[in-house]
Structure formats: structure tokens, C-alpha cells
Image (cartoon, rainbow, N blue to C red):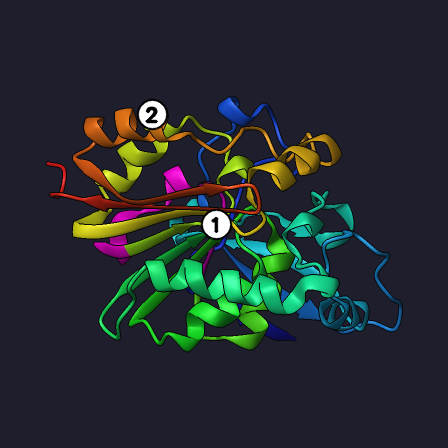
Amino acid sequence: MNSLFLPSSLLLFPSCKSPSPYLRPKPQYICTFNRHHHDHNLPTLSHSLKPSLQLSLSTRKMSIGAASPPDEGTVSVINFEDFTEKDWSFLDSDELNFKEHIQRIDQIISAGEIDESSKVLVSISSEEFVDRVVESSPSLLLVVHDSLFVLAGIKEKYDTVKCWQGELIYVPDKWGPLDVVFLYFLPAMPFPLDQVFETLANRCSPGARVVISHPQGREALQKQRKQFPDVLVSDLPDQMTLQKVAANHCCEIDNFVDESGFYLVVLKFCKAKN
């Protein structure tokens, strides 16, 4: 049995069925991917799977086991066949506008001002976005996502990237202090903006940059929310809302772009919160 361990602390909730976003329990277990080779194939589990990952998963049966300290007993293994995955296909780029999409991704990443000493967190993004961030060579890259399949695809390509399955507000501070945070798809985050920044204020270094983005802008988001209402639960914040949140958490808005086809906001922490 080959085992792919996610040192990034890939987490499970006690139940695979997602409760109400605001009642979702705090993740408790560190998990591994255990690959068991069998002759039969897995059924298609998510529209969001990349073809390469679909092929990878179809050749093996995968299960998740939660690793706990020896004195806590054994945690049950959950098979992927029994796991319900949301449709994250809206994160994929439009192949007809792929070049323009990559240019916007690069503009978003550039706003983070990453250097080789940066500790970077990316929340709910596409694999393409992670690919481009990896090229920036940060000292640490932590990817936070609700999708086990997206994280599995990232981990297959980049063993050094840390991957956390769960919500941003539950990410521990052991990887901090963070220097750059990309909230790539904020509307998929089921928590109030003030609560998100409360968490980031305790995880970020003085001067850390928080980049909120949508590569297709507010107009495209409205269409996506109609198509994916169970995943996209909020709108992109306007400038006045951001100013209020920033003031509450020792932030300042460094850049604000809200065009019909592109959304980009950069906030900078003035000091670490005590």
C-alpha cells in the first residue's frame, strides 16, 4: 500500500455531509491519503476533477484515514466512494480566454509581492493559480480548500506544498506568521468578512498583504452564483464594506479595482493583533 501523507494537515469533519455553513464543526483530525490498488474503477465523483486527476483516481481505490495520537484510539477510514464532493468547476478557466485568464492570475499574484522568504496562504483557488504561485518560489505555500480532490491534485504535483482541507478560520497558527494571503474566491467562504479578518489578524505578520480577487469580476460572479448557489454564498465586498472591516482589524486598503471583468483588492496589515 502506497501512502500519500499530507503534512499540511488535511482535515476531516466528523461527517461527510456538510451541515449549515455557520454550524460546521471545527476540524479535528490530521488525515492521509491511502492508495489501495484494485482492479475495479471508481465512479465519477465530481464535475470539478481535472482529466489527469480523474485518470489517476480511476486506477485506484482511495480512502482517507484520520491519524490520531496513539492514546486516542483508531479513527474510521472513509472511502471516497462515500464522500460527497461539491462542484468546483467554476474555478476552471474558460479555454476560449485562457491567455487573458492567465494574465489576470499573474496580476493577482503580483499584487501579493511574494519573495523567497514569504510565507503564503492561498484560499479556495484553482490548480492553475497554485501552479503560478509555486513559480514565485515562496519559502512556504499553504493551500486551504474544501475540496479533497483539488488538494489531492495539487499534492500529486507539489510534495512541498502544504494542503489543509477545511475552513480558513480553523487553520492553526503553526505555519505563521503569514506574509501574503490570497482570498482567491471569497464568495465561496461561508463566514462573515469580519470573522475572516479576525482570523487573519492573528495569523499574519506586520505588513502582511491580503489579496481578494475574482479574475472575471463581479458580473461573472452573479451568473456563477445562480449556477452554483450551494457553493457561492456571498458577494464580493464593496469599498465601503472593506474600509469598515479594515479599520476594525488594523488594515488599510492599498489597492481597489472593481471593474466589470476584473476584481482585485489589496489590504495591508498595519500591525499584528495582540
Identified at 42% across, 45% down, the residue is 72
Residue type, mark 1 in image: Tyr
Identified at 45% across, 29% down, the residue is 191
> Can I make out residue 122 in this image?
yes
Q: Which quadrant of the figure has residue 35?
A: bottom right
Q: Is residue 256 magenta?
A: no
Identified at 49% across, 55% down, the residue is 10
Residue 65: percent from left, percent from top: 58, 55
Residue to which mark 2 is pinned: 240
Q: Earlier in the sequence, mark 2 or mark 1?
A: 1
Q: Secondary structure at mark 1?
A: loop
Residue to which mark 1 is pinned: 184
Q: Which residues are magenta?
A: 163-179
Q: Residues within 10 Å of mark 1 (few under 14, many from 20)?
A: many
Residue type, mark 2 in image: Met
Q: Secondary structure at mark 2?
A: helix
> Can I make out residue 8 in this image?
no
Identified at 83% across, 61% down, the residue is 42
Instruction: Left or right? Give the position of 170 relative to 40.
Output: left
Residue 27: percent from left, percent from top: 46, 40
Using the image, determine if residue 242 lies above or below residue 161: above
In the image shown, does 8 or 35 lie closer to the viewer? Answer: 8
Q: Is residue 173 magenta?
A: yes
In the image shown, does 46 or 127 lie closer to the viewer? Answer: 127
Q: Residues within 10 Å of mark 2 (few under 14, many from 20)?
A: few
Quarter holding the C terminus is: top left
Instruction: Left or right? Give the position of 254 relative to 40.
Output: left
Q: Please say if the residues under marks 2 and 1 sit with CB atoms less than 8 Å apart.
A: no
Mark 2 → mark 1, Cα distance in angstroms: 20 Å
